[in-house]
Image: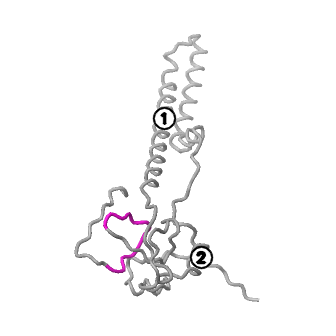
């Protein structure tokens, strides 16, 4: 009995191939688009055209992640050792002054400030991702079964769809330009940076 071992699928570099090669790879005709059956098969294979939705991490988990770093762990050990040394020296000399604990307290303060900044940056990154999701295209004109579908939700696109873009449209996915019907082309891509 011969079993077929599933191979990991490599992404198709459409940007570096000719339009004809791309159409052949995706099994689509420029004037017809994909058939409904083929769209269904590709949706089952590739899923929906949308960014993955992740639940936000709780604050306590974000704080703990800030201490999951080798340098931070070394500093925690150094603060603990410094605290022990200050305690032992204070016990031996009979003094328990605040000055003996300045060094470990400074290290702890630095680690707490580092955690605060890390959590703040992570929250900013999550807000930026949410803002990008808001900028996503809602609907687009697509060619399916030889007919133009004027307002197809962008999340329903699959690899191989023929999409028509006009002035002011948002690009709904990574795409290969198949045909330009203009003498000039200008794109606004500042949202990517």
Quadrant in which residue 121 is drawn: top left
Name the magenta segment's main secondary structure.
loop
Start-end of magenta stretch: 167-179
Percent position of residue 67, x then y: 55, 40
Q: Tell me the residue that label 2 is attached to.
A: 40
Residue 179 to residue 76: above or below: below
Quadrant including the C terminus: bottom left
Percent position of residue 59, x then y: 57, 38
Q: Is residue 100 magenta?
A: no
Residue 129 to residue 24: above or below: above
- Residue at left 43%, top 68%? 140
Q: Tell me the residue that label 1 is attached to.
A: 116
Q: Give the SS element for disc 2.
A: helix
Percent position of residue 86, x then y: 55, 21
- Horizontal arrangement in the rendering, residue 100 relative to residue 31 (left or right): right
Given the current orientation, which residue lies at the most extreme right position? Answer: 1
Percent position of residue 119, x then y: 50, 39
- Horizontal arrangement in the rendering, residue 188 relative to residue 175 (left or right): left
Near-viewer residue (141 or 65): 141
What is the image's colouring?
A: one colour
């Amino acid at each position: 009995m011969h079993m077929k071992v599933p191979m990991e699928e490599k992404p198709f570099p459409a940007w570096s191939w000719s339009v004809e090669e791309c159409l052949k790879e995706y099994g689509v005709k420029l004037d017809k688009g994909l058939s409904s059956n083929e769209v269904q098969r590709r949706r089952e294979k590739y899923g929906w055209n949308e960014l993955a939705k992740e639940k936000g991490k709780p604050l306590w988990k974000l704080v703990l992640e800030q201490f999951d770093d080798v340098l931070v762990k070394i500093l925690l050990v150094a603060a603990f050792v410094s605290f022990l040394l200050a305690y032992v020296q204070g016990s031996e000399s009979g003094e328990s002054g605040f000055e003996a604990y300045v060094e470990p307290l400074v290290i702890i303060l630095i680690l707490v400030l580092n955690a605060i900044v890390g959590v703040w940056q992570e929250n900013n990154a999550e807000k930026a991702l949410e803002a990008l999701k808001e900028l996503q295209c809602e609907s687009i004109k697509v060619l399916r079964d030889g007919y133009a579908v004027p307002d197809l939700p962008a999340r329903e696109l699959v690899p191989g769809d023929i999409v028509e873009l006009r002035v002011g449209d948002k690009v709904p996915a990574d795409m290969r330009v198949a045909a330009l019907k203009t003498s000039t082309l200008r794109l606004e891509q500042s949202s990517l940076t």
